[in-house]
């Protein structure tokens, strides 16, 4: 049996199992599929690179946990709206809460003076009982007097800004790029050091075009996937 055939047989086996379940041992798979151990390992390596299985030294091979999908859908005006991501209701765990001056770099990014005070928050976002994302949020103190760390652990942040502080998000620009986790990020997300990740940066404005939020988020590259639906005009 060739590697491609072994891979196809393994894919059928994966479809019959749930995320997190172990596959049979290499010896058992080799015998049941009638394939040599080197060919089997090569097929498993391919599946691991595709993110379908996770190979743990000394423990075996496991079906990868399902990816959390986030859709970006264009509006009639051509902008993109962001429906809620998949998964059970997302939870937030506060890592740090501070008040600090913006400084030159962040002040420029948020279009405020370097000495203006910011609420600076780091929180861990959890879905399906697993850490998914680290968010570093900055909001001008002037918009949110009296806000506490606990406020970042309950409910929707944008909902809180709107209902308590009458600060409504109207538009945002978000960029995404690949990165890898540093030691602190890896520990919080429960992934290896330098694991693949996605870095998102978002600048959010109110109706007056004032920046109300600047957020940098690190998402697990092995669990998070963005789907963009595009439409094209008809051509005669």
Image: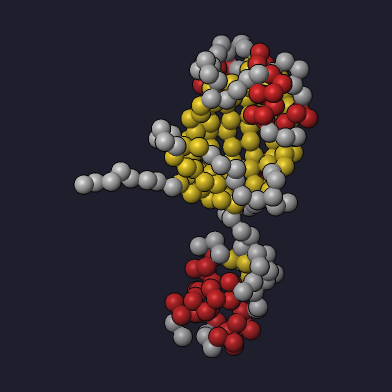
Residue at horizontal 54%, vertical 61%?
51
The vertical placement of 112 against 82, above or below, is above
Number of residue marks:
0
Residue at the front extreme? 236
**Which x, y percent locates residue 115?**
61, 11
Q: Does residue 66 appear left or right of residue 1 in this picture?
A: right
**Which x, y percent locates residue 179?**
52, 44
Say whether residue 41 is visible.
Answer: no
Residue in the foreground of this view, choosing between 112 and 81: 81
Say whether residue 4 is visible.
Answer: yes
The vertical placement of 38 against 93, above or below, is below
**Which x, y percent locates residue 211?**
55, 20
Image coloring type: secondary structure
Residue at horizontal 64%, vertical 84%?
28
Residue at horizontal 64%, vertical 71%?
17
Residue at the left extreme? 236
Q: Does residue 84 appear left or right of residue 236 in this picture?
A: right
Residue at horizontal 59%, vertical 87%?
32
Q: Does residue 56 appear left or right of residue 105 in this picture?
A: right
**Which x, y percent locates residue 16?**
62, 74
Residue in the foreground of this view, choosing between 211 and 112: 211
Residue in the foreground of this view, choosing between 149 and 84: 84
Determine the image quadrant of residue 165.
top right
């Amino acid at each position: 049996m060739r590697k491609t055939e072994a891979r196809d047989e393994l894919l059928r086996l994966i479809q019959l199992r749930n995320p997190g379940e172990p596959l049979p041992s290499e010896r058992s798979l080799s015998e049941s599929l009638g394939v040599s151990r080197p060919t089997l390992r090569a097929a498993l390596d391919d599946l691991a690179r595709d993110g379908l299985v996770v190979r743990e030294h000394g423990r075996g091979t496991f079906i990868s946990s399902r990816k959390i999908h986030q859709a970006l859908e264009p509006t009639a005006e051509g902008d993109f709206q962001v429906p809620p991501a998949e998964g059970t209701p997302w939870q937030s765990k506060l890592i740090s809460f501070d008040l600090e001056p913006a400084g030159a770099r962040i002040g420029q990014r948020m279009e405020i003076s370097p000495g203006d005070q910011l609420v600076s928050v780091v929180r861990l976002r959890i879905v399906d009982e697993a850490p998914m994302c680290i968010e570093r949020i900055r909001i001008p103190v002037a918009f949110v007097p009296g806000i506490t760390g606990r406020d970042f652990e309950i409910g929707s942040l944008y909902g809180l800004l709107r209902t308590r502080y009458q600060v409504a998000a109207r538009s945002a620009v978000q960029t995404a790029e690949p990165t890898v986790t540093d030691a602190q990020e890896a520990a919080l997300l429960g992934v290896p050091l330098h694991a693949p990740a996605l870095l998102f940066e978002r600048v959010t404005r109110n109706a007056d075009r004032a920046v109300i939020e600047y957020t940098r988020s690190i998402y697990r590259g092995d669990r998070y996937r963005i789907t963009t639906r595009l439409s094209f005009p008809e051509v005669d």
